[in-house]
Amino acid sequence: MSGGTLPGGWFDAGGQLHRDFDLAVLTGREEELLTQARHPRPAALVTEVLSRCVRRIGEVSPVPPEVIGDLLVADRLHLLLQLRRATFGDRVRAALVCPWPGCGERVSLEFSLADVPVEPRELPGRWHTMVLSDGREVVFRLPTGADQEDLAPLAGENEGAALTALLTRCVGRLGGDDDPDLAGLSSRARAEIEDRMRQVAPSVAQTMDARCPECGRAFTAPFDVQRFFLGELRTDGTRLYQEIHYLAYHYHWSETEIMAMTRDKRQRYIDVLADSIEALNDAG
Ligand SMILES: [Zn+2]
């Protein structure tokens, strides 16, 4: 079990902030979930994995999937990064192409997840109030995982429509209107609301500072936390079941016991077995 503090935090219906968390490591069960799931929506998959591994947020324990879905986007990214660190460690190896003209070399770089910049925020509550330059008052909340989940299909088809839908979900009141129609909002007012949202929201950087070992120049590499996490975990299902079979065959452990192990632990037992089988062969 590991723990930490969310960059933003979750406000319950009574307005109380829940911010520190406990996290259990990923086991074979979550890997199985990811190999089986053919989820078109990564955000839904993230909600499922996090609701299995996040054991407590503030005074909320267990943490239901609805709360995980209601977490701010940055809080979910932070939990994913901490889950990865707790399960597989802090180091990440990435294969990149140097973007500098005249170089373009394929390089392999190592990152430390502890270096991913996180900007926490002391949030006043779930709702934020601002005044537009036209004098109207806007009350909004920040985007959550559930917003991403629900809008993913639309975002794939029409990004502009998805942004309007996101604003419609997040803006609770506009100029005294509790059910405002945001399709008619001027692009200026819209930009003002979006800017303010970015300013007040906690953030987890989705880029990494890198230096090309070939040409020595620095560049910024994109780092899509969600895609990285899901891609790394999507072990090929055949291998997972081969490992379970191998361990069950040699140690006589049940499937349930083996699935409760982390990938690293399975691998360590498999290595020990391989060594001892080799020693047996040498002796014979
Ligand atoms: Zn280079």
Image: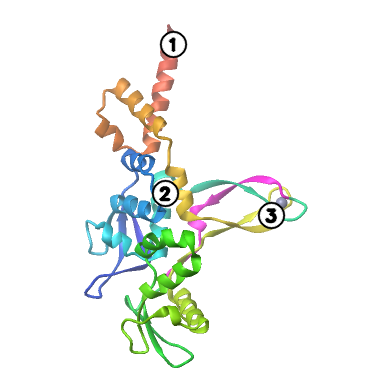
**What number is the disc on residue 281?**
1
**Label 2: which secondary element:** helix
**What number is the disc on residue 99?**
3
The Cα atoms of the two marked residues, 1 and 3, are separated by 50 Å
Q: Earlier in the sequence, mark 1 or mark 3?
A: 3
Which dot, 2 or 1, sits closer to the camera? 2
**Colour theme:** rainbow
- Where residue 149 appears, as percent x and y from the top left, is 37, 59
Please provide the residue range marked out in magenta. 104-120
Is label 1's Cβ within 8 Å of ligand 1?
no
| Direction from residue 269 to residue 161 in the image, left or right | right
Residue type at the position of mark 2 = Arg
- Where residue 14 appears, as percent x and y from the top left, is 21, 75
Q: Residue at x 29, y 38 (%)?
A: 260
**What number is the disc on residue 84?**
2
223 part of magenta stretch: no
Is the C terminus in the top left, top right, bottom left or bottom right quadrant?
top left
- Where residue 232 appears, as percent x and y from the top left, is 46, 44
Whether label 2 touches label 1, CB < 8 Å: no
- Where residue 280 appears, as percent x and y from the top left, is 41, 12
Q: Quadrant of residue 74?
A: bottom left
The Cα atoms of the two marked residues, 2 and 1, are separated by 37 Å
Which dot, 3 or 2, sits closer to the camera? 3
**Label 1: which secondary element:** helix
